[in-house]
C-alpha cells in the first residue's frame, strides 16, 4: 500500500502529454497507465518514467463521467513495463467540467497500490492535475505532492 508521505515526480514532457490527452478527449474522460519506479536516490520519491494512453472502454453514453481500461491492454502494458525494469504505478484520467478530486466512483474502483492522477479539464480553462492515493483505511483518498521536473 502506498502512503501519502511521498512525492510524485513527473517530467514536464509527460505532464504536458497528460494534459494534452485530457484536452483532446474532452468532453469525454481520457485515461491511461502511469509507468515508473521509486527514485534511486530517495525512496520517498516515486518517479514517473512514461505513460501509456488507453482507449476509454466505458459505454459511450457514460464516457463524460466514467472510464474503463481494457484488462488485456493493462496486462500487456504491465509485462512490457516489467521487461523495461518499470512497473505500472498508477492510472490517470480526466474529469471533464469537474474538479481534479476523486469521485465516489473513483473511490469504489480504486486499488491501494496505485497512484491516481486526475485532470480537471473544461472548454474554458487550462487543464490542471492533482494526484491521490488511498488512505490507510482505504475509505478515502489523500492528496500527494506532485513535482514537475524541468530538464
Image: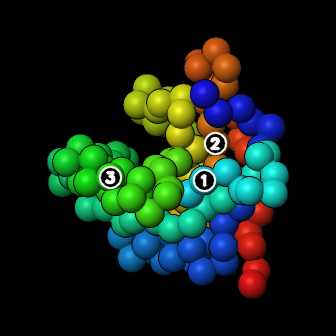
> Residue sitting at 60 percent across and 53 percent down?
37
Compared to residue 72, the image places residue 126 above or below, namely below
Residue 69 seen by the camera = no
Circle 1 sits on which residue? 37
> Residue sitting at 26 percent across and 54 percent down?
76
Q: How far apart in space, not on screen, are marks 1 and 3 (Cα)?
A: 15 Å
Q: Which mark is residue 132?
A: 2
Task: Using residue 74 as the reference point, say whether residue 91 is left or right of it.
Answer: right
In this view of the protein, which residue sits in the foreground, 77 or 84? Answer: 84
> Considering the numbered disc 2 on the image, is that residue within a helix, a strand or a loop?
strand
Q: Nearer the viewer, mark 1 or mark 2?
A: 1
> Residue sitting at 57 percent across and 74 percent down?
14
- Looking at this view, name the residue that lies furthest to the bottom: 151
Compared to residue 46, the image places residue 10 above or below, namely below
> Considering the numbered disc 3 on the image, is that residue within a helix, a strand or a loop?
helix
Circle 3 sits on which residue? 79
The quadrant holding residue 134 is top right
Task: Using residue 144 as the reference point, say whether residue 79 is left or right of it.
Answer: left
Residue 127 position in % (x across, y down): 59, 69
Classed neighbour count for the residue bearing mark 1: other residues with Cα under 10 Å, few (<14), some (14–19), many (≥20) = some
Residue 5 seen by the camera = yes
Which mark is first along the chain, 2 or 3?
3
Task: Using residue 75 as the reference point, say whether residue 59 is left or right of it.
Answer: left
Residue 99 position in % (x across, y down): 60, 52
In this view of the protein, which residue sits in the foreground, 135 or 40? Answer: 40
Amino acid at each position: 500500500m502506498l502512503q501519502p508521505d511521498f512525492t510524485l515526480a513527473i517530467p514536464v514532457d509527460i505532464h504536458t502529454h497528460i494534459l494534452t490527452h485530457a484536452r483532446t478527449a474532452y468532453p469525454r474522460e481520457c485515461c491511461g497507465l502511469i509507468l515508473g519506479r521509486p527514485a534511486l536516490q530517495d525512496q520517498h520519491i516515486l518517479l514517473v518514467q512514461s505513460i501509456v494512453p488507453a482507449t476509454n472502454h466505458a459505454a459511450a453514453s457514460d464516457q463524460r463521467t466514467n472510464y474503463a481500461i481494457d484488462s488485456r491492454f493493462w496486462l500487456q502494458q504491465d509485462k512490457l513495463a516489467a521487461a523495461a525494469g518499470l512497473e505500472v504505478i498508477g492510472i490517470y484520467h480526466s474529469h471533464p467540467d469537474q474538479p481534479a478530486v476523486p469521485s465516489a466512483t473513483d473511490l469504489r474502483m480504486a486499488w491501494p497500490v496505485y497512484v491516481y492522477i486526475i485532470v480537471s479539464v473544461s472548454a474554458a480553462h487550462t487543464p490542471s492535475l492533482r494526484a491521490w492515493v488511498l488512505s490507510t483505511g482505504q475509505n478515502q483518498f489523500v492528496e500527494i505532492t506532485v513535482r514537475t521536473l524541468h530538464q
